[in-house]
Amino acid sequence: MGKPTYTCDVVVLRKKRLKESDLILDCLKDDGSRLDLVARGALKPTNPFAARLDLFGACRCIVAPGRSLDVVTEARFVNAHENLRTDIRQSAAALPILEALDKTAQPDLPVPRLFEMTCTALDHAAAVDAERVPAVTVAFLLKLAALLGFRPRLDECIECGRPVKSEQDWTRISFLDGGAVCDSCAMHYETVRIQETTVAWARFLLMSTFNDIARTSIDVRATFDALDFARRWLAANAGVRLKSVDFLFSSGLF
């Protein structure tokens, strides 16, 4: 007797063609783990999977266990996040969320609160104007790093624990060792100088709720400086390099 089907909520992170009409879906499962699924016939024009199992979509699926990959038998939208699928600027700005998850989520390794945080971030990214989506993305990337155990320390020196008070317009940051470094301890670390305004925005985006971030006015240049900070932080601490962020910087969309 075969194993019984089960129901789960997923967010589709990436799609890959399998044979002529089938898809492999890289998904984030509702327990925060990664789940790869097969959608049989999803590429056929008459198959409803083509629309329901799309990038950015949060879906409730009925899944049948398979030999190597489980198979989606039914799917319905919980939230389609339509603007992220149809507006090129919003889609490009939110894509690093999916790529970061695709590169960090692991099979059979639940991460509490990750699925809920992802859905909240996508809800806000789909609801705000395109110019505000990058700020939501930066906040998600920094919060993801914190959830995975790589939280940046931006207020206190990572060596002596004293508050970092910069008399200049920049702060010493060690991406490899965990965050801010005061002048007295700088000789012990490899640091780079980051504009104090960038550090302040990174601190705000890390600590604030997505509701607060959606209501905050942050200009495009400051957002992209903070995005570069988040990109470098994930690369140094989680070994994650995001091609979608590189595209954002070179695309001219913002």
Image (cartoon, rainbow, N blue to C red):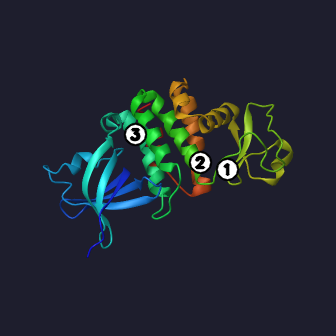
Q: Is residue 214 left or right of residue 45?
A: right
Residue identifier under label 1: 175
Residue at the spot x=14%, y=49% of the render? 45
Residue identifier under label 2: 232
Q: Position of residue 15 (x, y in %)?
A: 32, 55
Residue identifier under label 3: 92
- Spatial distance from mark 1 to mark 2, Cα to Cα? 7 Å
Q: Quadrant of residue 180?
A: top right
Image disc number at residue 246: none
Q: Are marks 1 and 2 in contact (CB under 8 Å)?
A: yes
- Spatial distance from mark 3 to mark 2, Cα to Cα? 19 Å
Q: Which of the two residues, 244 or 94, is positioned nearer the viewer here?
A: 94
Q: Is residue 199 visible?
A: yes
Q: Are marks 1 and 3 in contact (CB under 8 Å)?
A: no
Q: Is residue 133 left or right of residue 183?
A: left
Q: Which of the two residues, 164 or 120, is positioned nearer the viewer here?
A: 120
Spot the residue most to the left.
46
Q: Position of residue 30 (x, y in %)?
A: 43, 52
In the displayed structure, 253 sits above or below 240; it is above
Q: Is residue 246 visible?
A: no
